[in-house]
Image (spheres, rainbow, N blue to C red):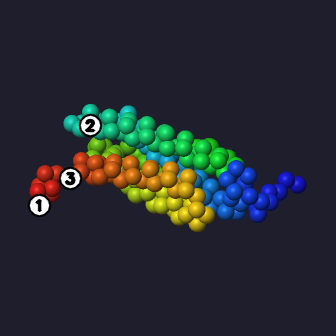
């Protein structure tokens, strides 16, 4: 029988397997949502049409490239704890709070959908930070805090894109 001693420290970090279980679980949930979000960005990038095509097309490409890097960072952070990240599309779709959607008709609808994803991802990132803070895991906290900082700025930009001049002036 190959059981893991849950009280034995993980040699490289000094945390027990039990201490890192919540972090790994929350990182895997974030990883799943990030993958569905990534594919949604790619799909919207390929599908956007209309007067805002160039702006939105480029922004979606910029975002899926950021997300691709973040996905790798999350998966590698799970490996740091001696665990393997989830890795199948089936697992991602089952675990993700972000759901697939049919491609919206307008760029504005696509941006609104991405902003909804941001809210889910930000909530999940805060859950990861809470788990990291419980064991004073500064590495995970720092990584996720950077993701949050960048996503909040992008959220502001996309929200500003959706506002019309009348609502900004009033």
Name the residue located 50 percent from the left edge and 50 percent from the top edge: 143
Disc 3 marks which residue? 163
Tell me the element at label 3: loop
Callout 2: SS: helix
Which corner quadrant of the image does residue 52 belong to? top left
Badge 1 or badge 3: first in the primary sequence: 3
Residue 138 at x, y percent in the picture: 55, 56
Alpha carbon separation for disc pair 1 and 3: 11 Å
Viewed as shown, does residue 138 lie left or right of 64? right
Q: Position of residue 100 (x, y in %)?
A: 46, 48
Mark closer to the chain start, 2 or 3? 2
Give the farthest residue toward the right. 1
Q: Is residue 124 visible?
A: no
Left or right: 16 as drawn, with respect to 95: right
Tell me which residue sits at (42%, 53%) in the image. Answer: 148
Sequence order check: which comes first, mark 1 or mark 2?
2
Q: Are marks 1 and 2 in contact (CB under 8 Å)?
A: no
Residue visible at 76% across and 63% down in the picture: 7
Q: According to the image, label 2 marks what residue?
A: 55
The answer, for residue 122, to whether it is visible in the render is: yes
Foreground: 103 or 78? 78
Where is residue 11 drawn, in percent x and y? 73, 52
Depicted 109 relative to depicted 44: above or below: below
Quadrant (top left, top right, bottom left, bottom right) of the C terminus:
bottom left
Q: Which residue is mark 1?
A: 170
Q: CA distance from mark 2 to mark 3?
A: 15 Å
Say few, some or many: other residues with alpha carbon within 10 Å of mark 1 (under 14 / 14 to 19 / 20 or more): few
Q: How far apart are the two marked residues, 1 and 2, measured between alpha carbons? A: 25 Å
């Amino acid at each position: 029988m190959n059981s893991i001693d849950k009280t034995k420290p993980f040699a490289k970090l000094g945390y027990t397997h039990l201490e890192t279980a919540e972090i790994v679980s929350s990182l895997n949930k974030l990883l799943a949502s990030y993958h569905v979000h990534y594919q949604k960005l790619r799909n919207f990038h390929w599908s956007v049409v209309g007067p805002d095509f160039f702006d939105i097309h480029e922004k979606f490409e910029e975002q899926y490239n950021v997300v691709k890097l973040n996905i790798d960072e999350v998966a590698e952070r799970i490996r740091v704890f001696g665990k393997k990240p989830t890795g199948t599309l089936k697992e991602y779709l089952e675990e993700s709070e972000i759901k697939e959607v049919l491609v919206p008709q307008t760029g504005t609808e696509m941006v609104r959908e991405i902003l909804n994803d941001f809210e889910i991802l930000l909530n999940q990132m805060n859950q990861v930070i809470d788990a990291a803070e419980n064991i004073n895991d500064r590495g995970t906290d720092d990584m996720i805090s950077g993701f949050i900082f960048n996503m909040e700025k992008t959220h502001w930009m996309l929200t500003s894109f959706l506002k019309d001049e009348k609502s900004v002036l009033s």
